[in-house]
Structures are given as structure tokens and as C-alpha cells.
Amino acid sequence: MGYSYNVRTGKLCCDSCGHTGGVRRFQCPFNWCPAPALCPDCAKQKRERLSKAAHRKAGCEEYSRRHRESCQRHEAALQAGHWVRTAAVTDSTPEQPDRVKVWFRNANGEERIEFFPAELYQSFPIGDPVTLEDFQKRQATPV
């Protein structure tokens, strides 16, 4: 969701009370969760929730770390010459029910499309950098 602005003045509105004037965004210290827009009064009231400790307790630090590591594994797979999963959609037909269409991309930005059984596709966590070779290896052995 985006930010709200006053139609007449174009100023940013506070996410908490709706007032304008002096409203600013408070960035997550771990660059994970959305930055709330708060006026000075609401920021004072929510000071504890805006702290680094509160963000850490909410999991922002851990989620941010996991995301960074996933991006590094994705980039390493590309640099190693692999085709990495970038998107997927259910693509069942009467002849082939429970089929998933999967897009892969290589380091040159070329795309390749493959089809896999839904059960195989679902055996890999969403968001993990998975290569075409990973799919092919798992397809060769029962799930």
C-alpha cells in the first residue's frame, strides 16, 4: 500500500491520525518492513515501536538477513551458469492436470520455460533460488 497525501496541499498524511504537516517516514533499521509516515505527536507516542529493538523483536533483522542470503545464492547460481527460477503459474490442461509452467533466467537475461508436475514444483520453498538442474534432479527421483 502507498502513502496518503492531502488533495489540496499535496502534503504527506500521518498513517496514524491523518494529519499533515511535519509528517515524515520512519525507515526500518533493517530495511525490511514498510516505513510508516507519522506526524511528530504520533511519532512520540509510537517511539518504542519505531526502535531498533522493536524491529528486531518483530523479526525484521532475521527476515532481512534471510533475504540478503537468498539474493546472494541467486546471484551465485547465475554466475555459475545455472538457469534460475524466476516465475511460475499453474498451467493445467485436461490432458495434464496439476501442471505448473516455470520460467527460468540465466545470467545473460535469456528466459526458458519448462513444465513440471505441481507436486514437484511445490517441493521447493517459494522464494528460494532454485535452478533448472534442481528440478531435473528431483524429477528423476520420486518426490
Image: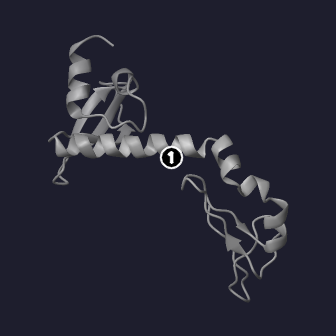
Q: Quadrant of residue 14?
A: bottom right
Residue most extreme to the front: 53
Name the amino acid, label 1: Ser
Whether residue 93 is situated above or below residue 103 in the rendered picture: above
Q: Determine whether, in the image, residue 60 is placed left or right of residue 103.
A: right
Residue closer to the observer: 87 or 79: 79
Residue occupied by mark 1: 64
In what quadrant of the picture does the N terminus appear?
bottom right
- Residue sitting at x 74%, y 89%: 8
Q: Is 103 on the left-hand or right-hand side of 65? A: left
The residue shown at (26%, 32%) is 115
Quadrant housing residue 128: top left
Q: Residue at x 33, y 13 (%)?
A: 143
x and y, in percent, of residue 12 in the image: 69, 78
Which residue lies most toward the top here?
142
Q: Is residue 77 above or below residue 121?
A: below
| 88 left or right of 67 in image | left
Q: Residue at x 72, y 84 (%)?
A: 7
Label 1: how many residues lie within 10 Å, few (<14), some (14-19) or many (20+)? some
**Where residue 70 appears, x then y in whole percent?**
38, 41
Q: Nearer the viewer, residue 70 or 116?
A: 70
Location of residue 34 (image quadrant): bottom right
Q: How many marks?
A: 1
Seen from the viewer's position, the closer of residues 141 and 96 is 141
Say if 127 sits above or below 5 in the image.
above
User: Of 2 and 63, which appears nearest the observer?
Assistant: 63
Q: Residue 18: horizontal and vertical position, in percent?
A: 80, 71
Where residue 108 appears, as percent x and y from the top left, is 15, 54
Q: Secondary structure at mark 1?
A: helix
